[in-house]
Image (cartoon, grey):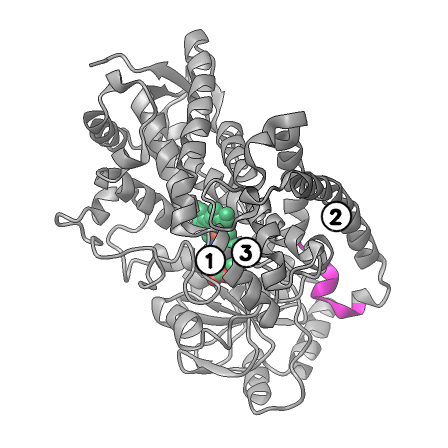
Amino acid sequence: MDAPPLLRLACTPLFGHVHQCQESEEAGAGAGAATRRRRRRRRRRRPSPTATFASSSAGAGPPPPPRRLAPARLPALRRLARKHGSDVMLLRLGAMPVLVVSSPRAAEAVLRTHDRVCASRPYSLVAEVVMYGPSDVGFAPYGDYWRRARKLITTHLLTVRRVQALRLAREQEVSAVMARIGEAAATGAAVDMGELLGSFANDLACRAVMGNSFRGEGRNKLFLELVSDTSPLLGGFNVEEFFPFVARFGVLSRAVRAKSERLRRRWDEQLDRLIQDHESTATASKTSKDDDEDDFIHILLSVRHEYGLSTEQMKAILLGVFFGGIGTGATALEFTVAELMRNPDVMKKLQAEVRSLVPNKAQGPVSDDNLRDMAYLRAVVKESLRLHPPTPILTAHFTMASCSVDGFAVPAGVGVLVNSWAIATDARFWEDPEAFAPERFVLDGGSAAGIDFRGADFRLLPFGSGRRMCPGMNFGVASVEAMLANLVHRFDWELPPGKAARDIDMAEVFGLVLQRKHKLLLVPRQRTCVE
Ligand code: HEM
């Protein structure tokens, strides 16, 4: 019995009738008689969560203040959805009502039918401090500011054209990684894939944000450190946000605020310096928002008046790029490589495709042009995002008015979690869902050939869908595909001596972004057959 204590307090799947879920009953079974009596009394007094739903939707009083959800507790949601077979569940995480949706139909209701109503985010103390308000795109509540900031990043920073313009940067960063792997291959040393792919994703994000100077004074390392120090707090669990009575004493929130403020000062120091450097080097030509060569800071400086942005808002938007772009890409790559090692036939097929389309004598990295013809590579990436989405529960949404989801009335002020992992591994919609089988996506007869991840099909949502859908999808996919193609083009991969494919542990750690629990150590070998 390992359900987290918060869920044991109260969790009720919405079956149309109310029942206490197994976790609560089992928790009761292990308790003393007095505790059991107290619990029974409390249960009798407490209205059922479903009843709360109905009365709130009838408009009884203002919605409760928005509260942050706890990603660290989310693994339990997988078990609950599976166990109760339920597409829509209402959980009470402490004082907070949270709707969990685990079917394409319910996800469509949240992300398409009621997209606007469900487009806000729950409050987060850490985001308020670290993200200046929050003024980034990811944590900002729905409203005028969010619309402006989102428009800015989708029309100036993360456009298809800008992603293409970053092609040279991508190729150079991939080449730098290949050189590091080459050194390891020469000595037979094992490579820590998480560390390698994490610094690749970080360097690429730094280069997009601040341009070619990103390695100067070890800036890329400083930012990597900042992201990894801030992520646990941003994705972590703050007990006071669920139990307001604890907040009366304020001790915990003071500690969380103090920690967040220390982090924000560290971010401030770096970002202020970068912005000042960019302001002082900006020339008329370097501040044109149409210049494909510009980095994100130059672009933000060139449009800040048009969008009415303060310096703090600019910094928050840049922070969003770091948090949106680094962990997700690294996680996607590391899980993909782990699956390829566990499935040698898939690895062979992928290598055959990449190597046949890019003869080794070309020497240079596999380019974006080559990638266009690699249908199997795209299927491998898609399958990996299905089985290991870096954000398995989409970033929490928050209802701004009442709406109906799959026949249930949902009031304003409810957190909404779309369990995209549960949907993408549900046997009702997927053949052999737990298997890593890219063939399912191959156009020529694959059972899921018609399913894409761009937000139109609610069976596959690694980037979400609707207004809050990931704006960095093209950026993320381009870097994952480029790195993966080069990893399998230039090298053969082996497990360290004494390890077998079945020893690769796929356990995950939940946080802002999913991570592998155990390191993936692999030994690279220069490929032997050279044309
Ligand atoms: C494989 C790579 C990536 C994956 C799987 C991914 C996934 C996601 C998901 C699931 C969401 C939440 C959607 C929702 O709330 O419904 C999201 C939001 C977001 N992502 Fe990504 N992402 C990736 C790469 C990136 C990159 C490279 C960037 C920026 C450079 C980025 C920036 C953002 C931002 C700013 C948001 C917040 C959008 C909003 O709230 O309006 N992401 N992403």
Q: Where in the figure is residue 338, as x and y percent of width and height?
A: 39, 33
Q: What residue type is labelled 1?
A: Thr
Badge 2 crowding class, 10 Å Cα cut-off, few under 14, some 14 to 19, many 20 or more, is some
The reply to whether the residue tagged 1 has its Cβ within 8 angstroms of ligand 1 is no
Q: Distance between the residues labelled 1 and 3?
A: 33 Å
Instruction: Kindly state the secondary structure of the residue where label 2 is placed.
Output: helix
Point out the stretch of residues depicted in magenta.
237-245
At x 62%, y 49%, the residue is 319
Residue on which disc 3 sits: 74
Q: In this view, does 484 lie above or below 97?
A: above
Residue 264: mark in rendering = 2
Residues marked 1 and 2 touching at CB (< 8 Å): no
Residue on which disc 1 sits: 155
Is residue 244 on the magenta stretch? yes
Instruction: Tell which of 521 and 209 is nearer to you.
Output: 209
Instruction: Kindly state the secondary structure of the residue where label 1 is placed.
Output: helix
